[in-house]
Amino acid sequence: MLTILGFVMIATFLVLIMMKKVSPIAALVLIPALFCVLVGKGAHLGDYVIAGIGDLAPTAAMLMFAIVYFGVMIDVGLFDPVVRAILRFAKADPVRIVVGTAVLAAIVSLDGDGSTTFMITVSAMYPLYKRLKMSLVVMTGVAATANGVMNTLPWGGPTARAATALKVDASDIFVPMIPALATGLVFVLLLAYVLGRRERKRIGYLSLDTVVEETVTESETADEKVLVGAGGGSGAGKAAGGGGGDHAATPYANEDGETFSGLDPKRATLRPKLYWFNALLTVGLLTAMIMELLPIPVLFMLGAALALSVNFPHMQEQKARIGAHAENVLNVSGMVFAAAVFTGVLQGTGMVDHMAEWVVGGIPDWMGPHMALVTGVLSIPFTYFMSNDGFYFGIVPVLAEAGNAHGVSTLEIARASLVGQPLHMSSPLVPAVYVLVGMAKVEFGDHTKFTVKWAALTALVVLGAGLLFGIV
């Protein structure tokens, strides 16, 4: 009975999420609470939730302060020179432009928010693609796939969800995966090179240096644009042109009446005199994270506090920066704590154990020791056709239990579950992808048709590298 109710609870959650009948937070709270009562354990709901919250508090803290930290870094202009350098490096060569798109998307993805990444990338690169009549789906496809690989960062979402659902440390999942993810990123750069060569063959090699100069000039013309977006709000809000903050730009028109966007080099939050301090702080923070000098939540707490105090010494300025990123912080941390209800009920009532027993019984003996590989393969279609919430909170715990029964560790399952992220970022269930195609003026169907095959191939490369390095 618990097996059936467990699968029905997961199915109900997935259907409501995919049909967008309720928000993920509401679904994570209300559906398990209802099923907890149905299995006759309603009196223990409080115990399950409190236990879950205790397990998830470090993950929530990490996400909250990571969002604030990288939001502040974008506000103060840490990534602005990178944008300008890529524009100048690209010149009018299609190969350089496409490779530059991949590099820019990967770098900006450090903030952990797809919407921010896509707004900054399109803002910088769209003028070049448009002026040279390059394929815009190449831009969206490369940006989405690069962001998908980088989306596996501990503060990006999937890793935190996997850690939350399986009650393991996010650094134990992510750090060993770095070689496989680096291989995936290298593959994206090679893919960008190949696609750029294809574009060069189609339109020819252009040496119009004025294109770059005009584009950079337009991107740096502060009088012609007004800033919006807080660098990490919800995709839906940004798609609608809403949000507060200082590092994404509203469109301005060119001579053809088309709109471009860019980073405002004169926004009030810029701190050019503190650029090297911020750069060294970020490098030091990431190095300490990889070396595991302190727990990741503690590192980001210290980093965020230091970044705010040095860049914005006045209390009102600090309040304004925190307020600019508050919506994204609340959405993400709220999701993590709401997940305590879902995972707590699933584990506390014993439903996950019964479901795992049923899954194990249906797996051939020869496949059991390879559950990490099975999980990696399943993650590619599953994370495309369902939300990350549904996959990591509904499916991965069951796969982990099944793998444990055959001697496969929970961490191996958790790492394998990240494989599908390059394709996930082009899923119709991801709000950020609508920001990408909307700003690039690309039909979603065209983007999907072009991107799916390359993103799926990238995911398989990551999986292959994981197997080769003995990570999964």
Image: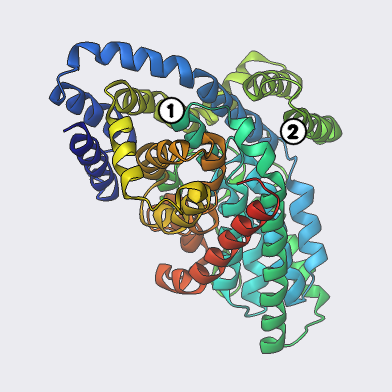
Q: Is residue 390 left or right of residue 302?
A: left
Determine whether the residue tagged by mark 1 lies in a helix, strand or loop.
Answer: helix
Q: Which residue is mark 1?
A: 336
Q: Quadrant of residue 320?
A: top right
What's the residue type where badge 2 is placed? Ile
Tell me which residue sits at (37%, 50%) in the image.
363
The crowd level at tag 2 (other Cα within 10 Å; few <14, some 14-19, many 20+) is some
Which of marks 2 and 1 precedes in the sequence?
A: 2
Q: Name the one closer to the observer, 115 or 291.
A: 291
Tell me which residue sits at (47%, 53%) in the image.
374
Q: Name the one closer to the observer, 12 or 8.
A: 8
Q: Quadrant of the N terminus?
A: top left
Q: Name the one closer to the observer, 95 or 249.
A: 95
Q: Which residue is mark 2?
A: 290
- Residue 101 appearing in the image: no
Determine whether the residue tagged by mark 2 lies in a helix, strand or loop.
Answer: helix
Tell me which residue sits at (29%, 41%) in the image.
358
